[in-house]
Image (cartoon, rainbow, N blue to C red):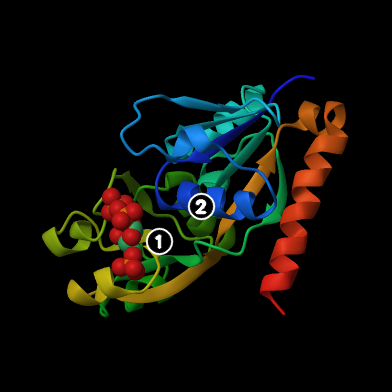
């Protein structure tokens, strides 16, 4: 039997995902050692492997088949636009992709002005402004702490993830428009879905059952 390989987005998401998987009998003892510098972990009994990757790399590993299954946020899936199957909403890591900025910037959005938009998600921002709103804007790619941009005058607005809203509030910014809701998703390689149909379906159905019980 060949290994089924999971790519998990490093951080909180990976920990929560492993918790969910362990509830359906998919566990990995090796992974629990916090001091380990290993990059890939194996459960020989289940013939499964698990590795942690930077979130934007998870869809890449899955598209190329280096991982059969990926667990990653919908933000990353939309931004990366890889050829993969999105099979399950894991109902965790819920947040929203939003256009945010100082209150005054709301007017600029209404009147379709040529504004600057700072974001870690240029593809999502382009799709939203160009295709949905038909507003021509200048997209400025940043790599983090996006909220700084309108404060220091780099851009009029930002497109970023809002979870609790604390970061915006503490920096005097508001949600101006909602782009889309987000949460963690399970994705699957297109070939693996056919070749390992039975084993992958078992994982999907196990998680579905778990999620259905959570909602009761
Ligand atoms: C994310 C996001 C916001 C913040 C939103 O940043 O980009 O900055 O969390 O959360 P809140 O609404 O609960 O305040 P992250 O911590 O991932 O770091 P980053 O700024 O480097 O992207």
Mark 2 crowd level (few <14, some 14–19, many ≥20, 10 Å Cα): many
Look at the picture and state if 54 lies above or below 134.
above
Residue 208 x, y percent position in the rendering: 75, 59
Residue at x 61% of width, y 64% of height: 91
Residue at x 51% of width, y 52% of height: 75
Residue 158 seen: no
Q: Is mark 1 within 8 Å of ligand 1?
A: yes
Residue 15 x, y percent position in the rendering: 46, 50
Res 63 label = none
Mark 1 crowd level (few <14, some 14–19, many ≥20, 10 Å Cα): many
Toward which corner of the image does residue 209 lie, by quadrant?
Answer: bottom right
Residue 109 x, y percent position in the rendering: 39, 71
Toward which corner of the image does residue 90 lie, by quadrant?
Answer: bottom right
**Of the residues under marks 2 and 1, which one precedes in the sequence?**
2
User: Disc 2 to disc 1, how far (Cα)?
Assistant: 8 Å
Q: In the figure, is residue 145 to the left or right of 98?
A: left
Query: Under tag 1, what secondary structure?
Result: strand
Image quadrant in which the N terminus is located: top right
Tags 2 and 1 in contact by the CB under 8 Å rule?
yes
Q: Nearer the viewer, residue 196 or 83?
A: 196
Q: Nearer the viewer, residue 10 or 86?
A: 10
Residue 201 seen: yes
Q: Is mark 2 within 8 Å of ligand 1?
A: no
Q: In the figure, is residue 148 to the left or right of 138?
A: left
Res 161 label = 1
Look at the picture and state if 73 lies above or below 65.
below
Image quadrant in which the C terminus is located: bottom right
């Amino acid at each position: 039997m060949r290994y089924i390989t999971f790519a998990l987005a490093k951080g909180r998401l990976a920990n929560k995902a492993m918790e969910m998987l362990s509830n359906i009998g998919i566990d990995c003892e090796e992974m629990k050692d916090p001091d380990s510098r290993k990059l890939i972990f194996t459960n020989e009994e289940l013939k499964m492997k698990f590795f942690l990757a930077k979130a934007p790399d998870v869809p890449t590993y899955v598209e190329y088949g280096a991982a059969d299954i990926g667990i990653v946020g919908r933000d990353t899936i939309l931004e990366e636009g890889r050829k993969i199957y999105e099979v399950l909403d894991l109902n965790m890591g819920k947040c929203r992709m939003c256009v945010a900025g100082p209150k005054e910037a709301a007017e600029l959005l209404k009147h379709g002005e040529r504004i600057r938009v700072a974001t870690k998600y240029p593809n999502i921002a382009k799709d939203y402004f160009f295709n949905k709103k038909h507003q021509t804007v200048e997209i400025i790619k940043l790599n983090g702490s996006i909220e700084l941009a309108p404060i220091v005058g780099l851009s009029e607005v930002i497109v970023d993830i809002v979870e609790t809203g604390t970061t915006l509030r503490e920096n005097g910014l508001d949600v101006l428009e909602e782009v889309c809701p987000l949460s963690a998703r399970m994705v699957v390689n297109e070939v693996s879905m056919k070749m390992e149909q039975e084993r992958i379906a078992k994982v999907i159905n196990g998680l579905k059952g778990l999620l259905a019980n959570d909602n009761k």
